[in-house]
Structures are given as C-alpha cells and as structure tokens.
Image (spheres, rainbow, N blue to C red):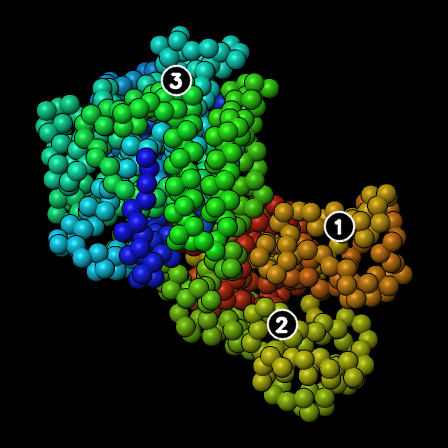
C-alpha cells in the first residue's frame, strides 16, 4: 500500500507549514537537435551568435555540435521558469531561422547521417572534447543524440529550516536536509514508471536511428518505426542508459558518493557525468559534484527522465511541470520505503515492463502482483488525499490529478498515443518538421517580446534578450525604472532603459535634453538647425504673435524627449491657437521654443558609437485602399499585424478609430465607411508618432552617406555614444548640402525597438550593438 506519513503532515498543519511545503525552487535544462529545412540533422557549427559555448550560462551545446542545450536560472515559481524557457526557445529560434534551421521537437533524433558523420561538440577544454569522443566510441553517436528535459527542484530553504526545528531531529540541519532529499529521490526512483507513463512522448523514431532497434521494431511507413506499447523510446533499452545497469545506494550521501567514485575509479564510468541515473543528487558546486556533495550536502534534485513533448512549443507544459512538482511533494509526505539494490533492480524492471506492456503490465507490490493501472490509480488517489489535507481550498491541483487519472483509464488521452496517431496521418519526419516550423513562426511573430518581462519597456526587453543570447547575465535592480545590471565575468555594467549607460556622461545627457543648448552646440560645429527663439512666459511669446502669424512654425518645450507638448503650424493660425500651443508647451517645461518649421520629411538616425545603426521615416497612421474594403475594415485588417498592440508593449501601436481620427477623415471629406480606391493612401492622423498608429519605415540603405556623416557629427558634437538624431531632408536622392537638411532634435535614450522591428524593413540589431559597445564585439 502507498500511504501518507501522517506524523509529518500533522507537523505541517500544526505549524502552518502546509502552504510552504508546496513552494520550491525550479529550473529546467532542455536539449534539442538542430535540423535543416528538410528535417536532416544540421551539421553546421554551434551558432556564433550565442557566444562562447563554455561560458554562456543559458545556451550551450550537449554531446554534439548539432545539439542546443537551453538552461534556465533558478526561479521561485513554475510560471517564471516556464516563461524563461520560452524566452530561450524564442531567442534560439530567431537566430536559427536566419539560416533555415529549426529546433527538432522530438526526444528521438531527426534524420541522421552515418554515425561517423555526426559532429562531436568542439570544446575549448580538451578533456571535455575527449570525454565526448569516448562517449561516441562507447555508445555510438546516434544514441547520444537522444534529447530531453531535466527538471531541477529544491524545497525552499526557509521551509526546510522550519521543518527541521519542529521535527525534533537528533542530527544537525545538514544531515536532516540530506536525509529528506534522499527520501524523495528513493521514492521517486521507485515510482518513476508512473512519471514516465504520464509524460512519455517519444513513441516513434526514424529509420536512420540505431540499426538493431530499427530491425526489432514495427513501422508505420518506410521511415517511421515504433514498438507496441512503448511511449518513451528514450527511457527504453534503445534509449539513454548506461551500457549495463548500475545500482548506487541512495541511503546516504556517503554511500552515493563512494558508489559513483568506485565506478569511475574502476573505469566502469568515464566520468561522474556518465552516471545516467533518472535522478541525480546535486550539490551547489558545479564543477566537482562528488566533492560538493561530500562537503556541502544536497542542494537540489535533478530528474532526467522527461521526453520533449512535441505537442508544446517549449517541449513541456505548465501542467506537466505542476504535476511533477506535486509528485515530488508526495514523495516527501508518503511513508518511506526501503530501496536496496534488489528493489532498485525491481524498479528498473517496472520501467521496462511499462514500456513493453503498457499499464496492463504487472509489478511486484510486496508479496502480490498487481497491474500497473491499479497501482497508478492508488498512487493518484493518495496524492489527492494529500492535497485535500494540505491544500483543500485549491481545486486546480485536484483537477490536474483528475486529468492524469483519466489518462489511466483512457490511453487515447496519453501524449504518446496522441502523437503517434498524428504521425500516422503524416510521417515521423513531416510531423515533427511541421511542428518545428509552426513553433518557429510563433517565436518570430512575437520576437520582440521577452516572455515573463513584458512589463518592461520594449527596448529594455530587447537588450536583455540580446544579453541572454550571448551569455551575459542580468539582474533587475529597479524593475519599474527598467534599471538593470549586466555581468560577464568580472565586467559589470549598469543600464537604464536600454541606452542610458556609462558610455554617456551626465553633461552629454543634459546637452541633448536642453534644446537651446543642443542648437548652440550644433551651430558651433557648422551643422544646420532651425532658427528660433526661447520664451520663459506666455506674455513675452504673445508679444511676438504678429511677427510669426504668417509663417510656418513649431512650438515645443525646451526639454522634451518624447515629442510631448509640441504643436506644428503649417497653415494660418489664430492668436487663440498660438496662445493655446504655448500654454500646452509650458505644461512640460518652464522654457518654450518657437522655431521655424523646416520642410521635407523627418528621419530618425540612430547613432551608436560613432556609427549610424538605423534610419527610420515615421509615417502617420494610414491605410491603403484595395477598392473593396472600407476604411474601417482596412484598419481592422492592418491591426492584425502581430507587431501592433496596445499600451506600448509592441513595436507598433494599433490604429484607432476614435474622435481624432474621425475628425481628420471628416476634414478630408471622408468617413469610415468609405471604400478607398486601389492603392489610395488614406491618412488618419497628421502627426507621425508610432504611439498613435504610425508606421516605421526603414531607410537605412536608401539615405546617402553624406546625411549619415552629418548625424554622426551631430552626435559627436554633443559627445554622445547613444542618441537619436532627428533630421529633416528635402530630397534623399540628392547629396547633403546646407540647404537640403536641418537637425531639429538630438534625443538621449533613443528607443531601439523601432529599429529592430520596423513596420517595413529589416532588424538593424541595435540591441546587439549596445552590447558590442559595452562588452566588446562578439568573437
């Protein structure tokens, strides 16, 4: 019988620890093979975009150069861990798609070349590379390409300390903690067959896999092979196992360390890492695990038996992660059971029985044989009883268990059978390749987003994603202010809102912030700027009304970086209009500028480190007629673009059809139900702001170099490493002269997302450029 340890549960309830037992710390490690557009194993090197594979904490290689490994940091919640894994999935996918490569969605390998043609990962450490070469000789390269997910878990340290205090343990805290994790590991190993049944998702494999396994298998078609009842090839005898069964004692840290050490010393194992146990005890010491366990004890458990699930973009779902967590808590709160070598052998046989016969197989339960289905129901019922005691008010976890119970009674709900049935309608290759391409499109559609950090400014999200890509760790030190610290080795940089960095001095920022000073600095360098005048009060401004009433002018606050409080008059305006414009501008600053309105089109030059990275022309909100749809319908269709959203959380804003837009249409003798002619452009706003639905059009390759040099000179004049130079240009087909352009503003803290994800044009990689300047160009 599987029974709960009521003494421990009562301790939790008596001391109000029942909530804390369901807390924890979580991490995931996910391996994927890279494939080309035809589903063949990609034989290209590990992408340079991810930096040095040895010191990138997030993106590495596994056995093969063709295998990507994604590693999340440790988080206090499943949701945060899942989000970061999705962010890593997006980051990797966005780089691979540029070279027509994809992440293979199955634990089982894609179409493989000859064994000797599978590239072993090239490592800087010769010992690491030698180890992989020895693995290839010992197991064959094809088996090493099996991929999966490692689920890392620990209880919260505060909880363990509290439990220790109320447990009346005779030993010290470290011994108590080690014993607790050993118990969870033993129980989990014994009942891992249930986890494999409920999470297994690798039932079919390609004919290019290991010949002996292919020869023994059945096939759905010429290329798609399977074994009846086997839901996880990876956990089978054809999967990721040691050459022969190895049984290490989990009764104490000393036994565990000694057992593995003896296997390494006897050359049974090449390294500690070759101990392919479904569960590993892990210390906080990354390099020397055995020494770390001996000196510091167990920090967390690593569960290694989980398949990539192609039904989910991330290879795993939130529900699967939650079920594994509840399973581990149950393994703590159930009665402990002995787990000697004989019982370890039986536990391994139970896994094989499951993979050969399914739930109809029988396992040894004390002195009688019971079906796996019967035992599985008993375990899930005991887990439900546990939740009713420690979390009775939360139906979500109970519903999760009910779903898993339905998977026992209806095999068609199991992941493996769902996947197998879909493969039968296609093939192993096409099913997984189509999934890979589908998930790649999903990653591309929201490529600007850093999942889990969507509350940050878009430019900050992009910078952090670029940092993760090349292995620069980050910490949010003031989330509301978008203030982060970036670290690479001993190198630390503090950055606010993506482009406020140590590379720009405070005086430089003040120069760009103050439009009067900006104009004087630029004029001194022979750069053309609009003529104008500064006012400290409305009365003085009103005295000059008659001077400017018949001219085209711009009224704006002296210090503005987001075009707030700006009014443009290009037609006749009344004295009341003039006064109202100044009143609005004075809301944003004590000094207001009146400048001549410069003709031409406005372009934003993004200057970084003395180089123009991107140039954009911002076009007011508009739609283009097709002769069929109304203006209203065209707006609806244009807003379907995944780059458009609301609340500045996307690179572009959705076009609105509010009072301002309707009034603008009315002034053109139009209304929302009109049908524009084919190719007719209908504008809905006068201002070109992205925030009101405007389009960002990339002109980086169209603008002559002479204008770029003016933008660079402007940045240098202010001493700026990062800035946005707003330039009016009459005709970009003509080279720059003093009459053809004017600099209207230099902006500190320029937004980079508009250059990375323009409405029309390519990604100018401004996020990478910032990191190049802060940390050096990626080698």
Displayed quadrant of residue 384: top left
Residue closest to the eye, 444 or 369: 369
**Residue that badge 3 annotates:** 356
- In 3D space, how far apart are the residues under numbered discs 3 and 1 (Cα atoms)? 54 Å
Q: Nearer the viewer, residue 348 or 134?
A: 348
- Corner quadrant of residue 445: top right
Q: Position of residue 111 (x, y in %)?
A: 45, 19
Left or right of residue 246, residue 18 in this image = right
Are the two marked residues, 3 and 1, in contact with CB atoms closer than 8 angstroms?
no
Helix, strand or loop at mark 3: helix
For disc 1, the neighbor class at 10 Å (few under 14, some 14 to 19, many from 20) is some
Q: Give the Cα distance between marks 3 and 2.
A: 69 Å
Asked if residue 466 can be seen in this view, the reply is no
> Which is in the foreground here, disc 3 or disc 1?
3
SS assignment at label 2: loop
Residue at point 32%, 18% (across, down): 237
Q: Quadrant of the N terminus?
A: top left
Q: Which mark is residue 636?
A: 1
- Residue labelled with disc 2: 564
In the rendering, at what x and y percent does residue 198 appear? 44, 32
Relative to 444, is 384 on the left or the right?
A: left
Element under disc 1: helix
């Amino acid at each position: 019988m599987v029974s709960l340890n009521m003494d421990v549960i009562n301790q939790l309830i008596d001391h109000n620890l029942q909530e804390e037992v369901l807390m924890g710390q979580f991490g995931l490690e996910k391996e994927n093979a890279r494939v080309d557009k035809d589903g063949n194993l990609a034989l290209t090197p590990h992408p340079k975009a991810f930096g040095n594979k040895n010191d990138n904490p997030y993106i590495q290689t596994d056995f093969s150069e063709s295998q990507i490994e994604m590693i999340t940091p440790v988080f206090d919640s499943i949701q945060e861990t899942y989000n970061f894994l999705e962010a890593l999935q997006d980051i990797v996918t966005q780089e691979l798609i540029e070279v027509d490569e994809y992440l293979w969605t199955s634990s089982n390998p894609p179409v493989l070349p000859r064994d000797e043609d599978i590239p072993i990962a090239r490592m800087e450490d010769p010992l690491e590379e030698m180890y992989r070469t020895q693995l290839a000789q010992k197991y064959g390269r094809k088996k090493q390409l099996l991929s999966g997910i490692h689920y890392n878990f620990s209880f919260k340290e505060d909880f363990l300390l509290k439990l220790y205090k109320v447990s009346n343990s005779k030993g010290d805290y470290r011994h108590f903690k080690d014993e607790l994790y050993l118990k969870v590991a033993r129980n989990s190993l014994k009942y891992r067959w249930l986890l494999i049944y409920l999470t297994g998702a690798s039932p079919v494999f390609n004919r290019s896999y290991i010949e002996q396994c292919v020869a023994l298998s059945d096939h759905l078609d010429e290329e798609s092979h399977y074994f009846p009842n086997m839901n996880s090839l990876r956990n089978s005898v054809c999967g990721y196992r040691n050459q022969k069964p190895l049984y290490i004692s989990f009764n104490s840290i000393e036994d565990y360390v000694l057992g593995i050490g003896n296997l390494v010393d006897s050359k049974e194992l090449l390294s500690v890492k070759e101990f392919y146990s479904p569960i590993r005890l892990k210390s906080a010491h990354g390099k020397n695990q055995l020494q770390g366990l001996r000196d510091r004890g167990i920090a967390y458990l690593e569960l290694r038996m989980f398949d990539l699930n192609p039904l989910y973009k991330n290879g795993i779902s939130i529900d699967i992660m939650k079920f594994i967590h509840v399973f581990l808590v149950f393994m703590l709160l159930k009665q402990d059971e002995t787990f000697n070598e004989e019982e370890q052998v039986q536990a391994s046989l139970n896994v094989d029985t499951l993979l050969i016969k399914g739930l109809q197989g029988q396992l040894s339960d004390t002195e009688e044989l019971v079906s796996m289905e019967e035992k599985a129901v008993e375990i899930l019922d005991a887990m439900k009883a546990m939740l009713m005691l420690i979390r009775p008010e939360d139906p979500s976890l109970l519903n999760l268990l009910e779903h898993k119970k339905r998977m026992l009674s209806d095999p068609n709900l199991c992941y493996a059978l769902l996947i197998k049935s879909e493969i039968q309608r296609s093939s192993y290759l096409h099913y997984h390749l189509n999934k890979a391409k589908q998930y790649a499109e999903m990653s591309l559609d929201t490529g600007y987003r850093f999942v889990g950090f969507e509350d940050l400014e878009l430019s900050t999200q992009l910078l952090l994603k670029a940092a993760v890509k090349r292995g620069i760790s980050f910490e949010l030190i003031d989330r509301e202010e978008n203030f982060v610290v970036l670290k690479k080795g001993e190198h630390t940089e503090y950055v606010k809102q993506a482009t406020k960095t140590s590379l720009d001095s405070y005086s430089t920022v003040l120069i760009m912030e103050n439009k009067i000073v900006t104009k004087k600095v630029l004029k001194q360098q022979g750069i053309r700027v609009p003529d104008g005048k500064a006012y400290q009060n409305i009365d003085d401004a009103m005295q000059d009304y008659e001077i400017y009433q018949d001219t085209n002018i711009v009224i704006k606050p002296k210090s503005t970086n987001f075009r707030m409080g700006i009014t443009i008059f290009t037609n006749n305006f009344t004295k009341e209009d003039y006064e109202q414009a100044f009143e609005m501008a004075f809301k944003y600053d004590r000094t207001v500028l009146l400048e001549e309105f410069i003709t031409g089109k406005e372009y934003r030059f993004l200057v970084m480190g003395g180089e123009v990275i991107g140039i954009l022309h911002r076009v007011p909100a508009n739609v283009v007629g097709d002769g069929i749809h109304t203006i209203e319908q065209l707006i609806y269709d244009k807003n379907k673009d995944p780059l458009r959203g609301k609340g500045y959380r996307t690179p572009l804003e959705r076009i609105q059809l509010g009072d301002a837009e309707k009034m603008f249409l009315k002034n053109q003798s139009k209304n929302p139900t009109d049908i524009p002619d084919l190719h007719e452009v209908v504008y809905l706003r006068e201002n070109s702001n992205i925030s009101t639905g405007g389009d960002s059009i990339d002109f980086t390759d169209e603008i002559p170099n002479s204008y770029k040099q003016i933008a660079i000179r402007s940045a240098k004049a202010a001493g700026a490493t990062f800035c946005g130079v707003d330039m009016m240009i009459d005709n970009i087909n003509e080279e720059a002269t003093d009459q053809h352009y004017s600099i209207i503003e230099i902006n500190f803290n320029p937004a980079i997302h508009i250059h990375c994800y323009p409405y029309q044009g390519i990604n100018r990689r401004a996020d990478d450029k910032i990191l190049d300047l802060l940390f050096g160009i990626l080698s």
